Amino acid sequence: MGSRLARNIGIPWIKPPERGCDDDNCPWHGSLPVRGRLMEGTVESFRSPKMAVIKREYYNYVPKYMRYERHRSKIHAYVPPCIGVKEGDRVIIGETRPLAKTVSFVILGIIEGR
């Protein structure tokens, strides 16, 4: 694989991957800017070798009943080749420009594996 140095993406608490790659759509080794929202989720499945489905669970407060309700959403995210992701891994995703019809997020790093 490539031996490009990891660039600074402007998020100091996310560590760059050890492996390198030659992908232009990689936020660490390419030229893809990360802007907007950062989210945490679980990798549910892979739609293609470079695209994963991330399941995000969150709570919503309902004032009428003074309780919280659980919600979950699925987000399609691009998987750079330098980040080895498997199903069940907990990952951080960041918003970027649209890469495909439904893909506007990229995986930045793994929090924990299964």
Image: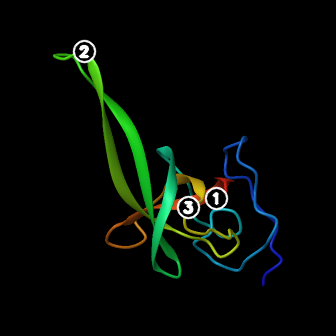
Q: Whole-percent x and y of residue 51?
A: 48, 74
* Picture mark count: 3
Residue drawn at x 57%, y 64% as measured from the top left = 32
Which residue matches tag 3? 88
Q: Residues within 10 Å of mark 3 (few under 14, many from 20)?
A: some
Name the amino acid, label 1: Arg
**Kind of residue at badge 3:** Gly
Residues 54 and 107: in front is: 54
Q: Which mark is residue 114?
A: 1
Label 1 near label 2: C-beta < 8 Å?
no
Q: Position of residue 74 (x, y in %)?
A: 36, 57
Report helix, strand or loop for mark 2.
loop
Q: Earlier in the sequence, mark 2 or mark 3?
A: 2
- Dot 3 lies on which element? loop
Q: At label 2, which amino acid type do we have?
A: Met
**Disc 1 to disc 3, C-alpha distance:** 6 Å
Q: Are marks 1 and 3 in contact (CB under 8 Å)?
A: yes
**Mark 1, secondary structure of its residue:** loop
Q: Residue at x 42, y 55 (%)?
A: 55
Q: Residues within 10 Å of mark 1 (few under 14, many from 20)?
A: few
Of the residues under marks 2 and 1, which one precedes in the sequence?
2
Per the image, the residue denoted by label 2 is 66
Q: Does residue 11 appear to the left or right of 5 in the view shown?
A: left
